[in-house]
């Protein structure tokens, strides 16, 4: 059998009936390797020493800890202070997909007793850990890194790092007049890369573009200028290769580009920027992804779609992955409140993805937030059109809104989407044809328990799953969400059913 390199990343390990995550972080030139094991949440991630013999295709892992023996073979007061795993790498190819298995024996060194050594079987599989979507199957954005503003995001990742294949913390922004790469809040930044490394999760920071329409126009002009664009690419590549702006000497697997709101006149500059950045990143062994809004069928039929900066066909030839933001159909500050991600619209947008023939390069993005609105003046119904100043907008995490909902007013869905496209159509629905109806699907909404004049539109676990299953069935490459932190109970287990 031909020799193969030991795959880095997460392995699902079974040691005599005890399942754990084995993460192989790195293998050095001399064969020494860095690895971790995670099986008991109370113990947490444990460091493992090891050695990989490429010639013999054999691995040795050594974990030093002191744990009580609870097996029937010895009294419970005896202890194990050393575990040694030895195994051989096997590779099989099934339907063109390589499957990797480590298999062998592990020994437990017992302190005290008549048997100083216990020998048992163990095995580990690499392919089963990646999920159905592959190496980018489960990712997420950590949006606000200020521990005073959003402690849940950083803390949630630290406690669930092994869930993620990739994490996209918003480490950088170019929201300034010179588009200089600038770090975001630094205090918690240094804790994310170590947690990711211990879990074998790739750190792939998001670079946030400007939010002001004037600066977005200026960014487009810069990208259309080959000389200035080259300088911008160089700055990004330098930070990707050897990060200096974020403390702790992190190691990145790539960058996620989120330059939203570019006008169509800047399409070629944006495409050239992505091509040049991706080509240089690949030289370093890194990758580039882009975050864009979801495009439905009507969007692809527009006469100007061929020069849309976010045209899927153009992006596919220029980046490694595309995160599609399947949310904000109704958004904070809209003329009325309604579903953030109506099921019919999500299904239509995912069909557009499937029609590209490259669904595996798309990552389905879903919201971890909902909308709230209170009528301040005018028509008392917040689900109909209002003018500026009549609505008091806010939003919250799904967990927050779920807990603040008045259960007596809870409704599992809404008929709002049947009214949304009726003329005169509001801005969020203006592209719909009269009579066209994106069904809402399951769409929880309610009144706030402490203030019945405030309306919530949000998702529960069932509505998230309803849409996530669509992404799975359309064979997308994975899922992501905005943002990590304060997830609904059961969220991570639900996602694992599909990716």
Image (tube, rainbow, N blue to C red):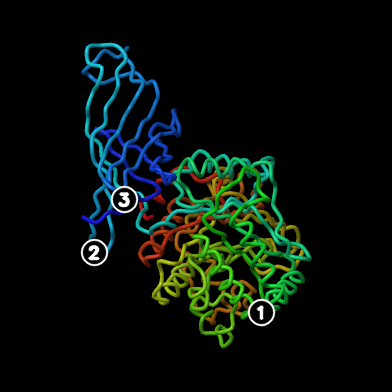
Front-most of 466 and 335? 466
Number of on-image labels: 3
Mark 1–mark 2 distance (CA, rounded to whole Å): 42 Å
Query: Left of 241 or right of it: where is 121?
Result: left
Q: Classify mark 2: residues with Cα within 10 Å, few (<14), some (14-19) or many (20+).
A: few
At 69% across and 51% down in the image, what residue appears?
184
Coordinates of residue 351 in the picture (x, y in percent): 42, 73
Q: Secondary structure at mark 1?
A: helix
Q: Secondary structure at mark 3?
A: helix
Which residue carries the number 2 mark? Answer: 95
Q: Is residue 4 above or below residue 110?
A: below
Disc number for residue 266: 1
The quadrant the C terminus occupies is bottom left
Mark 2–mark 3 distance (CA, rounded to whole Å): 15 Å
Front-most of 496 and 158? 158
Mark sitting earlier along the chain (3/1): 3
Q: Classify mark 1: residues with Cα within 10 Å, few (<14), some (14-19) or many (20+).
A: some
Coordinates of residue 261 in the picture (x, y in percent): 66, 71
Q: Secondary structure at mark 2?
A: loop
Q: Is residue 136 visible?
A: yes
Query: Left of 383 or right of it: where is 161?
Result: left
Mark sitting earlier along the chain (1/2): 2
Front-most of 29 and 132? 29
Query: In the picture, residue 486 is in which quadrant?
Result: top right
At 38% across and 34% down in the image, what residue appears?
39
């Amino acid at each position: 059998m031909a020799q193969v390199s030991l795959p880095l990343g997460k392995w699902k390990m079974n040691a005599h009936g005890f399942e754990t995550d084995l993460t192989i972080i790195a293998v050095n030139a001399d064969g020494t390797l860095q690895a971790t094991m995670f099986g008991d949440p109370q113990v947490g991630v444990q460091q493992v020493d090891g050695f990989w013999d490429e010639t013999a295709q054999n691995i040795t892992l050594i974990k030093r800890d002191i744990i009580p023996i609870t097996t029937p073979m010895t009294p419970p007061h005896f202890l194990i202070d050393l575990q040694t795993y030895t195994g051989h790498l096997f590779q099989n190819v099934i339907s063109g997909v390589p499957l990797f298995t480590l298999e062998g024996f592990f020994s437990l060194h017992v302190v005290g007793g008549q048997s100083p050594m216990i020998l048992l079987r163990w095995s580990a599989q690499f392919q089963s850990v990646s999920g159905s979507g592959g190496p980018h199957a489960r990712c997420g954005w950590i949006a606000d890194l200020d521990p005073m503003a959003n402690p849940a995001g950083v803390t949630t990742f630290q406690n669930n790092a092994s869930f993620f294949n990739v994490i996209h913390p918003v480490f950088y922004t170019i929201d300034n007049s010179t588009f200089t790469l600038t770090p975001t809040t630094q205090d918690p930044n240094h804790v994310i890369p170590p947690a990711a490394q211990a879990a074998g999760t790739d750190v792939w920071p998001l670079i946030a573009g400007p939010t002001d329409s004037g600066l977005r126009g200026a960014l487009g002009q810069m990208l259309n200028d080959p000389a200035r664009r080259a300088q911008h690419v160089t700055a990004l590549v330098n930070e990707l290769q050897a990060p200096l702006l974020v403390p702790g000497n992190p190691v990145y697997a790539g960058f996620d580009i989120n330059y939203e709101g570019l006008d169509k006149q800047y399409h070629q500059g944006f495409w050239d920027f992505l091509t040049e950045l991706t080509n240089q990143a690949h030289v370093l062994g890194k990758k580039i992804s882009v975050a864009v809004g979801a495009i439905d069928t009507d969007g692809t039929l527009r006469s100007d779609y061929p020069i849309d900066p976010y045209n899927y066909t153009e992006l596919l030839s220029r980046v490694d992955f595309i995160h599609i933001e399947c949310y904000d159909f109704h958004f904070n500050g809209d003329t009325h409140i309604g579903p953030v991600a109506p099921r019919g619209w999500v299904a239509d947008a995912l069909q557009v993805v499937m029609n590209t023939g490259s669904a595996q390069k798309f990552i389905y993005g879903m919201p971890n937030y909902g909308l709230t609105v209170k009528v301040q003046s005018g028509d008392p119904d917040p689900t109909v059109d209002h003018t500026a100043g009549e609505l008091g907008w806010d939003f919250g995490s799904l967990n927050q809104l779920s807990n603040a909902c008045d259960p007596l007013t809870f409704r599992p869905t809404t008929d709002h989407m049947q009214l949304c496209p009726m003329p005169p159509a509001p801005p969020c629905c203006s592209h719909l044809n009269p009579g066209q109806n994106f069904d809402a699907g399951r769409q929880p909404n309610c009144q706030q328990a402490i203030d019945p004049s405030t309306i919530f539109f949000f998702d529960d676990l069932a509505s998230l799953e309803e849409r996530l299953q669509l992404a799975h069935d359309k064979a997308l490459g994975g899922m992501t969400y905005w943002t990590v932190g304060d997830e609904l109970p059961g969220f991570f287990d639900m996602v694992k059913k599909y990716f």
